[in-house]
Amino acid sequence: MGFNFDPVTWVTAIELPVVGGLFWMLHGLRQQIADRIETGERRDGAELARLRDELATFKLDVARGYVAVELARDLERRLTQQVGRIEEKLDAISSIWRRGE
């Protein structure tokens, strides 16, 4: 007692449900992938916004540091000039004392 299936019955009873199930699985996988891509884009967008904010903060810190360096250079220049003037005055006083000896 064996089962004798003709090809049409085989296709109808076995292959069509299997192919339909595979199609439904592929459709579900495609939808999951599309959802993951969309979620990733939203997450990447938020990450990109955070990175932009951090970059702006870093640029501001660099600008503040640059201004501080420029102010320090200006202060150093002015102090050097003032010390130079004091040296000149001390040299002048020293030469007067030497002549007086």
Image (cartoon, helix red, strand yellow):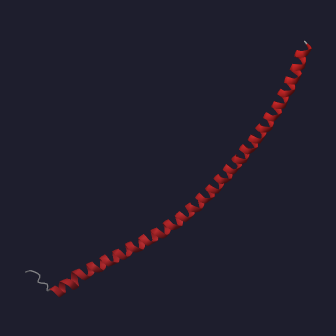
Left or right: where 30 falls relative to 44 = left
Location of residue 68 (image quadrant):
top right
3 versus 66 height, above or below = below
Q: Position of residue 96 (x, y in %)?
A: 90, 19
Residue lying at the far right of the rendered structure: 100
66 versus 89 height, above or below = below
For image coordinates 89% across by 22% down, the residue present is 93
Foreground: 51 or 70? 70
Location of residue 82 (image quadrant):
top right
Foreground: 6 or 55? 55
Which quadrant is the C terminus positioned in? top right
For image coordinates 56% across by 61% down, the residue present is 48
For image coordinates 73% across by 47% down, the residue present is 67
Foreground: 12 or 40? 40
Q: Position of residue 37 (x, y in %)?
A: 46, 69
Residue lying at the far top of the rendered structure: 101
